[in-house]
Image (cartoon, grey):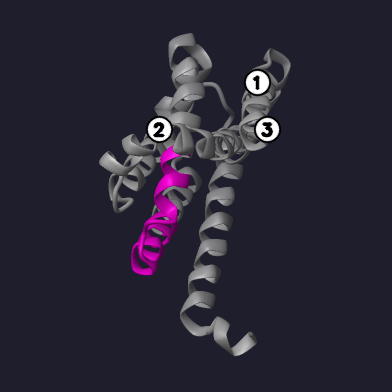
Amino acid sequence: MSQLIYGFLLLVFLALSPVRHLLESIMVIHMHMQMPLLVISGFLMAHYFQVRFPSFFRTWNRNGLPGILLFVLIMVYWMIPRTMDEALTMWSVEVFKFISLPFLAGIPLRDSWGKLSSFSKNAVITSFTVMFFGMGWLYLKWPEPLCNNYLLIEQITLGWGFITMALCLLIYLVYKAFVDPADYE
């Protein structure tokens, strides 16, 4: 129950007008801080919904694949530059962001991650690594602003943020491939 409260409080805090405007005023913070925090708020609230509606999750997300596909779909949607722009200019898209990231990405992620095999988890991480490298390259190399609400220098900073995240995920994948946890138990 306390995770539900923490997740809900985080969601309410992120929805406060001054906090929302501050986080959305800088492109890299909008993409790499506000959006993941919204997913985390849903991740925290997920346990309550799993306990409250176990048959629903058991029916539609038995092996974790539908939930992780929904998570990936929502995350890919919010990586598109146009959607970030529209979230700043259209209130309906902003509301959708505050609904989709916690409830359509965070909750399915928590329900699915434990059900996935090690291979599936690595496949998801690998796909995000490739997407982050691609998005980083796009934001770095595109000669004009992709988002009308941000400057070109902010776009370049976001590109380096994507490259950094991709490198961190790549290091994790290499670690998982070459280090056996049983050696350290």
Give the farthest residue toward the top: 91
Nearest to the observer: residue 81 or residue 125:
125
Residue occupying image coordinates x 59% and y 41%: 32
Q: Quadrant of residue 29?
A: top right
Q: Is residue 133 magenta?
A: no
The residue beneath circle 1 is 12
The residue beneath circle 2 is 53
Callout 2: few (<14), some (14-19), or many (20+) C-alpha neighbours within 10 Å? Answer: few
Under circle 2, the secondary element is loop
Callout 1: few (<14), some (14-19), or many (20+) C-alpha neighbours within 10 Å? Answer: some
**110 relative to 27 in the view: left or right:** left
Residue 67 got which mark?
A: none
- Indicate whether 168 appears above or below 131: below
The image shows residue 85 at horizontal and vertical percentages of 47, 23
Q: Please report the bounds of the magenta region as a residue range.
A: 107-129
Residue occupying image coordinates x 53% and y 47%: 159
- N-terminal of the pair, mark 3 or mark 1, is 3
The type of residue carrying mark 3 is Tyr
Callout 3: few (<14), some (14-19), or many (20+) C-alpha neighbours within 10 Å? Answer: some
The image shows residue 33 at horizontal and vertical percentages of 63, 38
Residue occupying image coordinates x 67% and y 27%: 23
- N-terminal of the pair, mark 3 or mark 2, is 3
Under circle 1, the secondary element is helix
Measure the alpha-carbon separation of dots 3 and 1.
10 Å
The residue beneath circle 3 is 6
